[in-house]
Structure formats: C-alpha cells, structure tokens
Amino acid sequence: MGKIVKKQRPVNLDLQTIHFPITAISSILHRVSGVITLIAVGILLWLLGTSLSSPEGFQYASEIMTGFFAKFILWGILTALAYHICGGIRHMLMDFGCVDETLAAGNSSAKITFVITVILAILAGILVW
C-alpha cells in the first residue's frame, strides 16, 4: 500500500487580505447581475399581470410604484440590467476578436464597462424619480 502524504499548505482565511483583479470583479458582477435580472423578470411579470388584470389591479400596481422602496428596487433592476448588457457586449467583443484577450485590454474594457454602467445608472435614477 502507498503512503498517504498530508500536504501542509498555508491557508489564508483572512478575506480582507484577498484582492481580486478588476477583471475578476467584472466577471463576478456580470454573473450576479444575471441572477438579479432573472429574479427581476418574475417581479416585473407579476407587476404587469396585476396592472392588466382589471382597473383596480392597475390602480394597485400604480400605488405600489409610488413608494420609495419600489422605486429603489426598480432602479436596482435597471442598473443590474444595464450592467449585464454592458458586460455581455464586452464579452461578445472579446469573443469576436474585436478586443484583444490580453490583461491590459481586459482591465481597460472592465473599467469602461463600469463607467458606462454608472452613467446608465444615473440616467435610470433620473427616469425612475
């Protein structure tokens, strides 16, 4: 029988010392925004169904959307959707070879994605409020 060797590797459990590169943050946020968008589809379909069910349903949906919390949720949904679209376009441009697959190009495209998303989030805030 073979000998079992236990590897003694250092384990870093201090999450404050771990720093992700901007490309990793961009990729993680793209996945998170996709999940948020998927959940948002259910919420928005429910709201649409309620508003189309009857005149009373429309009034109820209108009342829901006048509150700050509902507007904040809608702004979050629009921001997540904007980021997911921008991140998706970024990935497609890299897949089609329009953007180099180098670390420098990845960092630049991630930063551009963040800037465009901030601009779109501000515009969404103006639209919602």
Image (cartoon, helix red, strand yellow):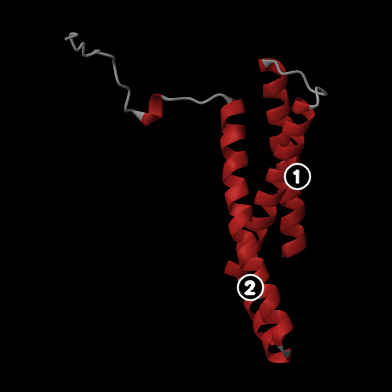
Left or right of 25 in this view: 13: left
Q: Please tell me the numbered disc located at residue 46.
A: 2
Residue 24 place in picture, x, y as percent: 57, 28
Furthest-top residue in view? 2
Residue 32 place in picture, x, y as percent: 57, 45
Left or right of 19 in this view: 36: right
Q: Please tell me the numbered disc located at residue 119.
A: 1
Residues 41 and 119: in front is: 41
Labels 1 & 2 near each other (Cβ < 8 A): no
Crowding near the residue tagged with mark 2, few <14, some 14–19, many ≥20 C-alpha atoms within 10 Å? few
| Front: mark 1 or 2 | 2
Q: Amino acid at mark 2?
A: Trp
From the image, which quarter does the N terminus lie in?
A: top left
Q: Earlier in the sequence, mark 1 or mark 2?
A: 2
Q: Quadrant of residue 28?
A: top right
Residues 107 and 119: in front is: 107
- Residue at position x 83%, y 24% in the image: 98
Q: CA distance from mark 1 to mark 2?
A: 28 Å
Residue 103 place in picture, x, y as percent: 66, 16
Crowding near the residue tagged with mark 1, few <14, some 14–19, many ≥20 C-alpha atoms within 10 Å? few
Q: In the displayed structure, would residue 56 be above or below residue 26?
A: below
Q: Quadrant of residue 87?
A: top right
Residue 22 place in picture, x, y as percent: 60, 27
Q: Please tell me the numbered disc located at residue 68.
A: none
